[in-house]
């Protein structure tokens, strides 16, 4: 792929990259370390990530602060307009809104509700594995 495009990594993909590694980690590294893609994040996604790392996975405040700094300094932070109402789970609309606002080409997620859409406008909604296979 010749030109860099924008990705939205859903919270579940970010958590998988941090906690479970595998393909989500490879995708995150390709954004952060290799600068292959422009990954965007919103304050809401970052807040959800922090909450889940702390309360679901028991991360220390210090480790959470480190991850917060990494994401604030390496991903493009954006505050989209929140007006989309297309998802079965209303909480997922923030992912769509960020993708539209940022001009993302892909939403990468493991969320079945988002994946069931397949596409929104010109934004493809795919799993980490499918995205990784497209790039290989």
Image (spheres, rainbow, N blue to C red):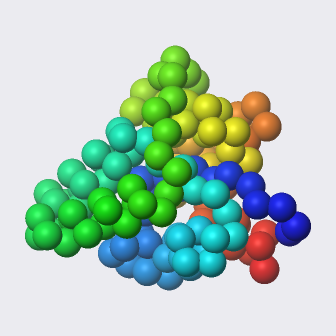
| Quadrant (top left, top right, bottom left, bottom right) of the C terminus | bottom right
The answer to which of 110 and 69 lies nearer the viewer is: 69
**Vertical position of residue 99 compared to residue 86: above or below:** below
- Residue 131 at least partly seen: yes
Residue drawn where x is 56% and y is 42% of the image: 114
Residue drawn where x is 73% and y is 48% of the image: 105
Task: Name which quarter of the figure residue 100 lies in.
Answer: top right
Residue drawn where x is 55% and y is 37% of the image: 98
Task: Name which quarter of the figure residue 72 lies in.
Answer: bottom left
In the rendered image, residue 50, in percent from the top left (x then y), is placed at 25, 54
Does residue 25 appear left or right of residue 6 in this picture? Answer: left
The answer to which of 69 and 129 lies nearer the viewer is: 69
- Residue 13 at least partly seen: no
Q: How many marks?
A: 0
**Vertical position of residue 93 compared to residue 113: above or below:** above
In the rendered image, residue 115, in percent from the top left (x then y), is placed at 61, 47
Does residue 119 appear left or right of residue 61 in this picture? Answer: right
| Quadrant (top left, top right, bottom left, bottom right) of the N terminus | bottom right
The answer to which of 122 and 29 lies nearer the viewer is: 29
Seen from this angle, which residue lies furthest front? 73
In the rendered image, residue 46, in percent from the top left (x then y), is placed at 34, 49
The answer to which of 109 and 61 lies nearer the viewer is: 61
In the rendered image, residue 52, in percent from the top left (x then y), is placed at 24, 55
């Amino acid at each position: 792929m010749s030109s860099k495009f924008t990705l939205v990594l859903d919270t579940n993909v970010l958590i998988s990259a941090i906690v479970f590694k595998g393909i989500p980690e490879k995708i995150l590294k390709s954004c952060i370390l290799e600068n292959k893609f422009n990954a965007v994040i919103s304050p809401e996604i970052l807040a959800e990530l922090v909450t889940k790392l702390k309360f679901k996975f028991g991360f220390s405040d210090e480790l959470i602060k480190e991850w917060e700094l990494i994401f604030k300094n390496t991903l493009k932070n954006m505050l989209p307009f929140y007006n989309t109402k297309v998802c079965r789970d209303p909480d997922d609309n923030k992912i769509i809104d960020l993708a539209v606002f940022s001009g993302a080409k892909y939403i990468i997620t493991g969320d079945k509700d988002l994946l069931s859409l397949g596409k929104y406008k010109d934004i493809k909604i795919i799993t980490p594995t499918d995205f990784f296979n497209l790039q290989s």
